[in-house]
Image (spheres, coloured by chain):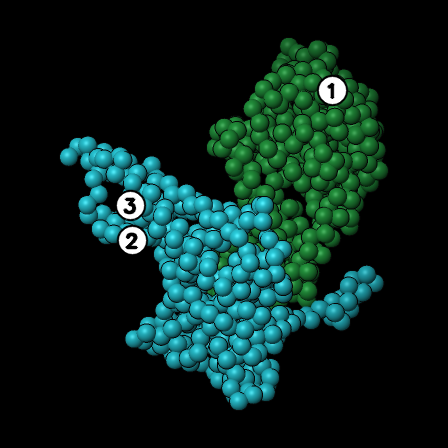
Amino acid sequence: MKKIILVFIIFLLSGCFNYKEVSDLAFISGFGIDYLNDNFHIILEVQENDEETSSYLLEGSGRTIESAIQNASLSFNKNLYFINLDILLISSEAANKKLPNILDYVTRDNNFSFNFNIAICDNQKHAMENILNKKEIFGRYINSLFKNTDTNVINIKLDKLLNHYLNDKYDIILPVFNIIEDNIIINEAVIFKNKQIIDTLNEREMALYNILNNNQKDYYLTLENNIVFRTSHYYTTIIFKKNTLYIMPTLTGTFMEFESLELNNESKIKEITNKVNEEFNSELDTFIKKIIQNNSDPLGFKRLTKIKDLPNIKYHINTKIMLENKSLIFKSVGDNS
Amino acid sequence: MENLKIILTLFKDTPDLIIRPISKRFFDIYVIYIETLCSGDRVNTYILNHLTLPGKRNQNIKKILTGPNFKNIDITEAEKYLCLGFCLILDGDDIYAIETKAELDRSIDEAKVEPAIFGPKDAFVENYQKNIGLIKRRIKSRHLKIKEKTLGRYSQTTTGVIYLDNIVKEYLVKEILNKLNTIDTDSLTSSGELKQFLVDENKNVFPAMKLSERPDTIVKSLLDGKVVILVDNSPFAIILPAVLADFINPTVDSYVNSLNTNFLKFLRIICFILTIVTPAVFIALTNYNPETIPSELLMNIATQRRGIPFPAIFEAILMLFVCELLRESDIRFPNAYGSAVSLLGALIIGESAVSSGLVSPIMIIVIALTFITSLIFNEVEINGAVRAWRFIYLLFASFLGLYGLALAFIFMLINLCSYQVYTLSYMFPVSPFDLSYLKETLIKVKRKKQNMRSKFLTDNIRKQV
């Protein structure tokens, strides 16, 4: 009996230390942070599961992120819960000036998970309202955008960002949200140098970044005569040997569209494949040059080469394009015709 | 006459005691029996017909009486034999007892508690001799031994300890007989009652022995090196020792294809775990670690819980309590009322509880899963143990979340591993590991590979397949 009483006393004294009632929690799906006039302006998307509203927004300002959140939740009857956060939007101003504070805050607060996406967006309220008007939850909608392998969005989550941010031999890269004709499009990414934004990557460059990072998104290349080569999968090896950086992407794919390709002519197919190789090589070369000239290193070349200044680096690109077996369908169709 | 007087004194106020005097040449003989225990036809056929025939009247009783069981007894045994359904014949100073027992038991019926689709259909009945017969029909060997004891001062219940002497470990039989010798009770009416004398009840909620109504299960246990106890007037035999794996895997598995059976065995283990931990895991995840639940599901749970005035733990305990009530009333009520109770239960725990705002729909699913998974065990004792552990897990999870769940799991593991049933660990054959018994219970292998008995149960480990 004494043992049972003791167990009960231990339970009553030490139990329920982080008890939460799910119906008392406000699940935050989207979180935007802006920095203006020495003040943080935050915007929170609270998920709702009503038939009428999918979610609603809370706004607040303060000298610190915490005070801004406190101000936002002043008139709110539930506890803000960030564990299910899908997207953290940071304005370019906040990214340039207060990125260390933001990362420090979300890492320190154990209410945050490490599994949300981070992106740059300057018009956060507009972006969120845009999706809310479509009766969709902003965070989940953006999550599905990131998961879509048809687009070449760069997908950066907190753990990866922290990993690169805390490493001297890496520079960070973040995707950018743009609103074009009331549609959210992630068609750019910003690269940082010494924790400051220095340049922007376009959609084609984002695709190349994904190839070099083996992110397995779809990549296509359009040649003259409207011949389209599309990858099904790719693998890139980067090694540093004899003071030279060897970048060796292997792309496996197929021709999706063609106008003047002679299907039964193997040498012609070979020729086109070589053309793809050349085009890709030159595109990749331009991209690498851009990165190197900026002395920004989102790909971790400094870690591989142990060279501090990227402009001095020697590199060699060796691309291998492989046609998938199912491309032989061209040949068989050609033979029959 | 002296003997008659003693019997009359012993059975004073026994209206069903029949005393029939039959006159012989110089004195009367008395035919005495208890009407309610004896068959009138047998008394007539075996005794009265012979004694009253004119030609035989003066012959020696031993020569003229028929009947398969004929004994010359002492006056001190008269009470016992009369109560056993014997007919006593007082011939001067001699007392003869002839078995004229009436058939008071039912015929052999189908197994109701442990049904098998392809196994034998017969099951034990209340008649001890018939039960022994059912076993002996399946084991035709001189090695099958039965040691009988009479237990209960008033009930005088015959209890048989059955084993195969060339397979069983001797110390096990000795230990069981020693325990039986220490029993001094007024009455013993069933094997369930005897079970409580054989094991220390306060030690663990899990049962240390298994009850079975199937003769084939009993035979298999005997061949594994276990001991079986049969109690008169009880249609269940006790198998001991029994470990957790025996309850999860019934013998009827041996009648089905091994590959299909393995899936079922795996399913049963999953069910055993689920029935204990489901409500506790739900409470721990929703109240302490909601981050582990996908956000869409979590949102649904939160929406469903909106408007429920009680915390989730109270909701769970309330629903478990209602379900236990329903189960108990379903068992206790006569079958005719059964459907009404089920209907009422479905109404209470289904639509009404949700619409009245007492519980959330997700909790109904959690509790339903808990109870559906518990239905795979037909043993009442194991269900009781599972219920007790379910509440312990729930208590730990409600105070400490997943950490509490881990603590409860460790607590249960220690409890099960340290539980000894007649020198066998309750987690046997997992701990201590024994492949041959594992093949008998937790997994099923090809029959040809099942060629060993467990060395923990027998010294005669080689078996023919």
Q: Amino acid at mark 1?
A: Asn
| Quarter of the figure with the C terminus of chain A | top left
> Which element type, helix, strand or loop, lies under badge 3?
strand
Q: Identify the mark at residue A222; answer none if there is no mark.
A: 2
Q: Identify the mark at residue B15; answer none if there is no mark.
A: none
B36 w.r.t. B353: above or below: above
Give the chain coloured cyan: A
The answer for which chain carries disc 3 is: A
| Quarter of the figure with the N terminus of chain A | bottom right
Residue A203 falls in image quadrant: bottom left
**On the rendered structure, is B224 left or right of B76?**
left
Residue A82, percent from left and from top: 55, 72
| Mark 2 to mark 1 CA distance (whole Å) | 79 Å
Can residue B360 be spotted in the picture?
A: no
Residue B41, percent from left and from top: 58, 25
Residue A11 falls in image quadrant: bottom right
Mark closer to the observer (2, 3)? 2
Q: Identify the mark at residue B460; answer none if there is no mark.
A: 1
Residue B40, percent from left and from top: 60, 28
B444 w.r.t. A41: above or below: above
Residue B239, percent from left and from top: 69, 34
Q: Amino acid at mark 2?
A: Thr
Q: Which residue is mark 3?
A: A255
Residue B200 falls in image quadrant: top right
> Which element type, helix, strand or loop, lies under badge 2?
strand
Q: Tags 2 and 3 in contact by the CB under 8 Å rule?
A: no
Residue at screen point 74% across, 69% down: A14
